[in-house]
Amino acid sequence: MAHYRRLGEVPPKRHTQVRDPDGRLYFEELMGEEGFSSDSSLLYHRGVPSAIVASEVWELPDQTRTPNHPLKPRHLKLHSLFPVVEEGAQRLSRNQDAVNDRRLVLGNNDVRISYVVTGGHDSGPAPYYRNAIGDECVYVESGAGVVESVFGVIGYRTGDYVMIPRATTHRWVPAEPSRLYAIEANSHIAPPKRYLSRYGQLLEHAPYCERDLYGPTQPFVQEGTDVDVLVKHRTSTGIVGTRMTYATHPFDVVGWDGCLYPYTFNIDDYMPITGKIHQPPPVHQVFEGHNFVICNFLPRKVDYHPLAVPVPYYHSNVDSDEVMFYVGGDYEARKGSGINLGSISLHPGGYAHGPQPAAVEASLGAEFFDESAVMVDTFAPLDLGEAALAVEDPAYAWTWAGRGGDDPAVFSNS
């Protein structure tokens, strides 16, 4: 979902001639979802958007998946995936880009979660890239920069969700080291339907509105020939990559209009919904895709019933796997478990999960939680990617029985 925008040169009527000052015809491209039946935008190119001069195999980063078997909860330390070295300021131990160096953490046939740190010393932009499988929602754990695209440029900063529609050619250009948590769908990603009117406007009870969404503000026209674009796409055998070489630069769009384009939404603009007693996770939902949802847990006032228990109750989400990515503050329900900033917890369906035992009593009487986390709940089991196997804390599963994890204040901003 995104509201209508119009940038640059577009003709008064759709599918009619529009020419440059020298009389050359611009080439119109309809970029639309669900076979002409959903959101779309019309783009006007200087060159032919279909003109490729080469197509070669692009070897994707390792997409191997390992079942979560035997079944158990997992703690994954993502910050261990990309070490930094200290030289006055933090620098990456080597230069990574936001596409080729993504490492698969978790995934199934509906969604994949990857992690990368990019923008190290002397690093440049990522390659031009297009995900032809589904929308991408990339959470910026830290860092800043821009994303260039056929629609224009959007800036990103810490706490942004960067929403990139399926098949949008773009590239990441970090201005500083950026920790990126990429949620790649096999579908589209949009606000929950219950937040939207039947015509697509965000309603009054929604925890954010259109004012909080930031799209491109002007066209971004570039010159060039024989430009490589990395394309992630589907075949009958699974997910593969192709390097397409375009005769002219794909960023040659002089104008466009419509309701389909990349945008950012910052987590600080989400207004948490609270209640007298503990509210279930759906009140924290921010987006949804096919067979999964995205929620964020943010600093907020907590339950104000005199006998309220502010931390979550133990629960068996019998239809879901739950993934929590801990990005700020001091997450109350996980104290004593070894969880820290940059951690992921995976609590799979078939396993009752909830707070660490000592956290329940410790939370009584609390008025405010200073915690931030991004949650993905999936309705099909998640497998472990190679990155998960590389950075798992093997003691986590036994911490509720007092047989693993670290002692008291393990979760801090340090």
Image: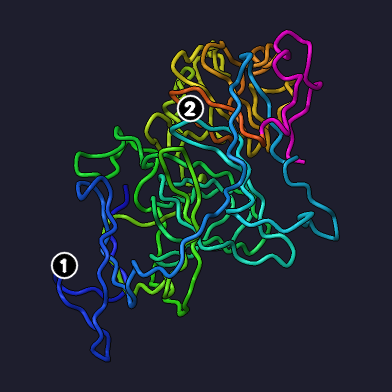
Q: Amino acid at mark 2?
A: Asp
Q: In the orientation shown, which residue stands out farthest toward the right?
A: 87
Residue 23 drawn in magenta: no
Q: In the orientation shown, which residue stands out farthest toward the top?
A: 401
* Type of secondary structure dominating the magenta stretch: loop
Distance, label 2 to label 1, CA atoms, is 40 Å
Residue at figure coordinates x 65%, y 24% from the top left = 332
Q: In the orientation shown, which residue stands out farthest toward the bottom?
A: 22
SS for callout 1: loop
Q: Relative to 348, is 80 above or below?
A: below
Please give the range of residues in magenta.
Answer: 388-414
Q: Relative to 378, is 252 above or below?
A: below
Residue at figure coordinates x 69%, y 16% from the top left = 397
Image position, residue 55 (x, y; %)? 46, 61
Q: Amino acid at mark 1?
A: Arg
Q: Relative to 268, is 45 above or below?
A: below
On the picture, is 282 further left or further right than 342?
Answer: left
Residue 3 numbered tag: none
The residue nearer to you, when weighing 208 against 107, is 107
Image position, residue 75 (x, y; %)? 68, 26
Residue at figure coordinates x 28%, y 40% from the top left = 203
Q: Which image quarter: residue 262?
A: bottom left
Closest to the camera, between mark 2 and mark 1, is: 1
Quadrant of the image containing the C terminus:
top right
* Mark 2 lies on residue: 377
* Mark 1 lies on residue: 14
On the picture, is 162 further left or further right than 390?
Answer: left
Image position, residue 254 (x, y; %)? 33, 75
The residue nearer to you, when weighing 265 against 55, is 55
Q: Residues within 10 Å of mark 2 (few under 14, many from 20)?
A: many
